[in-house]
Amino acid sequence: MVGSGKMVGLVMMIVGVVLFLAFGAWASTALFTSETSSGGAVLGVFLALVVVAPIVGVGAYLFRKGGD
C-alpha cells in the first residue's frame, strides 16, 4: 500500500512508548515494594530503553519517510 508507512510508523512509536510506560510502572512498583534494589531498577530501565529505542526510532523513520 502506498503511503502506509506513516501509519505503521505511528503505531510503532505508540507501541514503544506504551511498552516503556508499562515497564516503568512495573519497575516502580517493584522498587516501592522492596522486590528489587535501586541499582536493579536503574539497570532494568536502561535495558528497557535498549529494547524500546530501536522500535521508536524505526517508527519515527517510517513516519517521516512514509509520505514520500
Image (cartoon, helix red, strand yellow):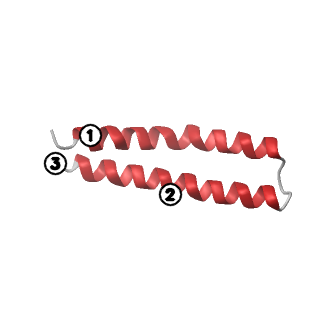
Q: Position of residue 18 (x, y in %)?
A: 50, 57
Q: Is residue 48 above or below residue 11?
A: above
Q: Position of residue 10 (x, y in %)?
A: 33, 52
**Which quadrant: the C terminus?**
top left
Residue denoted by label 1:
64
Question: In the visual, does 56 lie left or right of 37?
Answer: left
Badge 1 or badge 3: first in the primary sequence: 3
* Mark drawn on residue 3: 3
Badge 2 or badge 1: first in the primary sequence: 2
Question: In the visual, does 34 lie left or right of 60?
Answer: right
Badge 3 or badge 2: first in the primary sequence: 3
Classify residue 42 by image quadrant.
top right
Identify which amino acid the numbered label 3 is placed on.
Answer: Gly
Q: At 61% across and 44% down in the image, what residue appears?
A: 48
Q: At 30% across and 51% down in the image, what residue appears?
A: 8
Identify which amino acid the numbered label 1 is placed on.
Answer: Arg
Identify which amino acid the numbered label 2 is placed on.
Answer: Val
Question: In the visual, does 18 lie left or right of 25?
Answer: left
* Mark drawn on residue 52: none
